[in-house]
Image (tube, grey):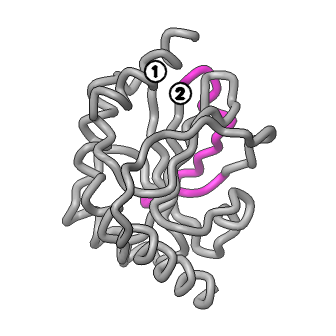
Amino acid sequence: MKHLMLFIALATNVYFSQSVAFSLKESNINVTPELELSDLNRRLHNLANYQGKVVMVQFWATYCPPCRKEMPSMNRLEKKLGSDKFKILAVNMGEDAEQVQKFANEVKPEFTILLDPDGKAIKAWKVYAAPATFIIDPDGKIRYTLFGGIEWDSDEIVTVLSKLLTKN
């Protein structure tokens, strides 16, 4: 697991050292992996329970500068789209609950933080860099992916996600 985390940290640094404009990419993933993890309050969350909503599943880490930077825009995005139709499940990548809680106390995410202490979800979702984001449509299909950090409440992103919300 430590080797995987080191690889992810290095890949993230290389990825973000390039000046590339990040945007959502249409997904060619045919099967959405399962996701069942506990939050910081030890409540179990299962992605299947969110069917009918648009869900952002994001894999992130406390040591990832772009992850920290984009979380306020994620808070704003969920408010803009309405949490009754849109949910964010932010999956921490293998760190302990105490470390994640300390980060949450500093950054103040207003969305659900999930813990993946053994890296099972990282493997199932084939995540290789942080942040890695998957947008799930109301039918449970991965519609968009993004590897990298962005301002989630930008007009471009809000427009794309709003179209998914109106298809429900």
Residue 152 point in image, percent of width and height: 33, 40
Q: Amino acid at mark 1?
A: Lys
Taking 49 as reference, is 97 left or right? left
The residue nearer to you, when weighing 111 against 154, is: 154
Residue depicted at x 54% and y 75%: 94
SS for tag 1? loop
Which of the marked residues, 1 or 2, is nearer the chain's N terminus? 2
135 to 90, vertically: above or below: above
Residue identifier under label 1: 85
Q: Is residue 133 magenta?
A: no
In this picture, which residue range is highlighted in magenta? 36-53
Q: Amino acid at mark 2?
A: Val
Q: Looking at this view, name the residue that lies furthest to the right.
A: 31
The residue nearer to you, when weighing 111 against 156, is: 156
SS for tag 2? strand
Task: Characterize the local packing of mark 2: few (<14), some (14-19) or many (20 or more) Cα atoms within 10 angstroms.
Answer: many
Residue 117 point in image, percent of width and height: 58, 73
- How far is mark 1 from mark 2, CA to CA? 6 Å
Residue depicted at x 61% and y 56%: 37
Residue 124 point in image, percent of width and height: 74, 60
Q: Looking at this view, name the residue that lies furthest to the bottom.
A: 3
* Mark 1 vs 2: CB contact within 8 A: yes
Quadrant showing the C terminus: top right
